[in-house]
Image: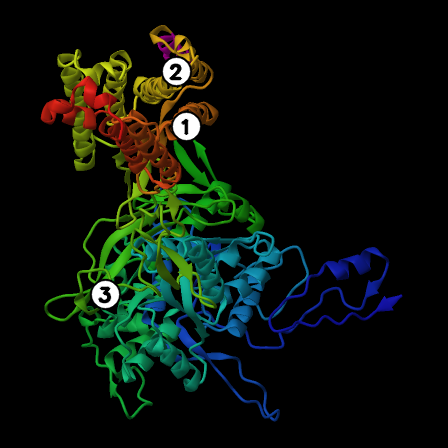
Amino acid sequence: MTVVVLVVCLDGLKQRIEPLEALTDAGVSTEASSIKCTLQSTPRLPAFSMDGDFVIGGVFSIHYELHIVIYNYTTKPEPSRCGGSFIGRELRFSRAMIFAIEEINNSTKLLPGIKLGYQIYDSCASVPVAVHVAFQLTNGQEPVFYKGSNCSQSGVVLAAVGDSASTPSISISRIIGSFDIPLVSYFATCACLSDKQQHPTFFRTIPSDQFQADALAKLVKHFGWTWIGAVRSDSDYGNYGMASFLDAAQREGICVEYSEAFSWTDPHSKIQKVADVIRRSTAMAVVVFTASAEMRVLLEELTREPSPPRQWIGSEAWITDPHFLRFSFCAGAIGVGIQQSVIPGLRDFLLDLSPTEVAASSVLTEFWEDAFNCTLKRADPDKRLCDGTEDIKSLKNPYTDTSQLRNTNMVYKAVYAIAHAIHNTVCHETNLTTRCDKHFRLESNQVLSELKMVNFSQNGYPVSFDSNGDPVAFYELVNWQKRESGVIELVTVGYYDASLPKGQEFHINRNITWVEGRTQVPVSVCSESCPPGTRKVLQKGKPICCYDCIPCPEGEISNTTGSLECFSCHSEFWPNAERDACFPKPVEFLSFHEVLAIILAAFSVIGACLAIITAVIFFHHRTTPIVRANNSELSFLLLFSLTLCFLCSLTFIGAPSEWSCMLRHTAFGITFVLCISCVLGRTVVVLMAFKATLPGSNVMKWFGPPQQRITVVFLMFIQVLICTIWLVLSPPFPMKNLTTYKEKIILECALGSAVGFWAVLGYIGLLAVFCFVLAILARKLPDNFNEAKMITFSMLIFCAVWLTFIPAYVSSPGKFTVAVEIFAILASSFGLILCIFAPKCFIILFQPEKNSKKCLMNKK
């Protein structure tokens, strides 16, 4: 069976012959023994080309745009061609590739005896042209395809260098990657190209935008810019790059006021809208992740109506482009750029252009005519004819500017990386010499395998690729600094090295000039940082960088700037007035140095002295009737107990200690019981003495001096027993009272057992009430000097003092609790000594005539 097979070639793509071979193997006979396929479109001519043993492709965006032709379907379509502006920097890149290949061809160490060729194309920064170029790199230059064993391989590349932009590089990588042809880019930085599933044959000598985004985020964070604007190219480079930056910025706590995307091909109204957003914004810092084309149209629009001062932060695609240094309002811009480098001999090569060489290349011809405003042809009457006097060394344009070789070195390294991969495949070391086989049938997949493992250094710059095809990220931090002459220069002020440990990648080693020539870092925040002593409260509906600062609550501090929370001080510490530090709380107790304590101590000593003086008076007049009539033994014991009562109040003054706490309460309880016992004994004696005057009464035999002593001892023993049990089971102890006052510590004696304390007071109160009742019963006894009345008054004062003491004690704060207790002791003690002994002392000292038995026995 004979089958006629029609092979169609689409736009320069040769169809594989395997389907025909499969038909033949299956017994199907084709009509012709050889098949000739004519291309249906004119192949694209390279900008520069040279034959060689192995050919390397190159793709550069030498022109800015694709010339659009509107077809009328009446004539044969013309091949696509480039138009628009001529990009001198891209021409330098392409010429740097040629320089590197010629340098390799002249080398005796790398690929000796091998001649590398090249096919360099202009992609016009256009995806359709880039796709066309990719097909041509894949299939070669020939217009026909021959089936046979000696099929021509002319023009088929083993690897390619390019493209500048990420979007065309993505298109090229997807096409040539299907044929295992590696693509090494020098300027395409989109992080998406690191995906080896999508782009298995893509490599680059420039770092990925993922590293650039991290570097820019750290740069913005380093200078405290938490409120920024974001502008990007509406392309793969801008969208992917800005997405990576925004993720990194979010991790660093940076907020974005606006995020705008545009393309240089957008209508003027769209570009004007982006410029207006920048003008109206409150963010001082603007991060611009755009290609040079977008940045150019944006800056030109801002030139028409300048915005308020803005601190520009730029990506490497435009921040190192000297073409933009003419925009003076961008002085102070800072960003990351590719490391500066030195390529020996490159400048001489770039400037070594003869008129003959220029005339032989349409690209160089266009460059020459554009640079010198002359024509090499006689067809243009508007331009003078180039006469050969043109001096390229006098030119100052992006092509001749080699002062900042950054991306040019990326091209240089890309060519050398491919050359090393080819060298490692076709060359072998033998007897200390290198032999290379130029007839070796080298396949692109072999170059791909070797390219993954290259690791060398060229001119001191290391070249290697990680598993994603990316190099080690190293950026210089560049700053646009205006000199006194008004000229803006690119100055390297630091670096970012991703190979260093985390936190050490970012370094600044030179002074930076900011917007408007300032030396201080400009501020770009939504809200000023909250000072220590305050905390942030987010504003409703606003980003986290917009907040209000409110003071820390009572008892809490914040000791850092921009604190989100306040925290409490330790229980023994209290904030200062600014609430930014904790200080030890002042310790408060009733000190001997305080006026109140001095007054109380003075009254205590006065009272003790008064009791002693009274005892001395009584002892001196112990034989007088008024002393003998009032039971001198109990009087002296009472005066002794009152002296102790006055003195025990001193134990309440001063810093509490373990012993003072136990002593103050027990001494107070025992001495007061001793005092009340004596008063009670005197009251009973007075009462019984008048009862004994009744006929037939012998009651006084039960209330003689021995019985009085036993009564006092017994009553005091009960109190001693209560105090002992209290001290054994749960004694008072010193403590720091942290609850009464938040801002200070009260040193006081804890009761230990409240039951013990109130048992002591209750027992004293019980004796006082009993004594008071007895004194009332004896108040109207018929005696000229009725001591029962004095005892009644003293017990009335005593009970009144201690009844008012209870609520005052409970409600008094801090050291005033102790003062109230001392006051109660002194008041009750003074009440006893004044009511019982003052009248007697007055008679003894000032009315001795009444100190007689006759006066005492007279009835009223």
Q: Which amino acid type is shown beneath numbered disc 2?
A: Ala
Q: Which amino acid type is shown beneath numbered disc 3?
A: Gly
- Magenta segment, prevailing SS (helix, strand or loop): helix
Q: Which amino acid type is shown beneath numbered disc 1?
A: Gly
As drawn, the residue found furthest toward the top would be 706
Question: Residue 346's quadrant in the figure?
Answer: bottom left
Q: For the magenta stretch, what is the residue range?
A: 707-717
Rendered residue at 26%/46% (across/down): 576
Q: Residue 692: give its label.
A: 2
* Visible residue check, residue 162: no
In the drawing, does residue 207 fall left or right of residue 814? right
Earlier-in-chain disc, 3 versus 2: 3
In the drawing, does residue 533 fall left or right of residue 209? left
Q: Is residue 504 above or below residue 612?
A: below
- Callout 3: 10 Å neighbours few (<14), some, many (20+)? many
Question: In this view of the protein, which residue sits in the foreground, 562 or 820?
Answer: 820
Q: Residue 349: give its label.
A: none
Q: Pointer 3: what residue?
A: 332
Earlier-in-chain disc, 1 versus 3: 3
Quadrant, the N terminus: bottom right
Q: Pointer 1: what residue?
A: 765
Question: Residue 595's quadrant in the figure?
Answer: top left
* Visible residue check, residue 192: yes
Question: In this view of the protein, which residue sits in the foreground, 420 or 464?
Answer: 464
Earlier-in-chain disc, 2 versus 1: 2
From the image, state whether disc 1 or disc 3 is nearer to you: 1
Question: In this view of the protein, which residue sits in the foreground, 170 or 112?
Answer: 170
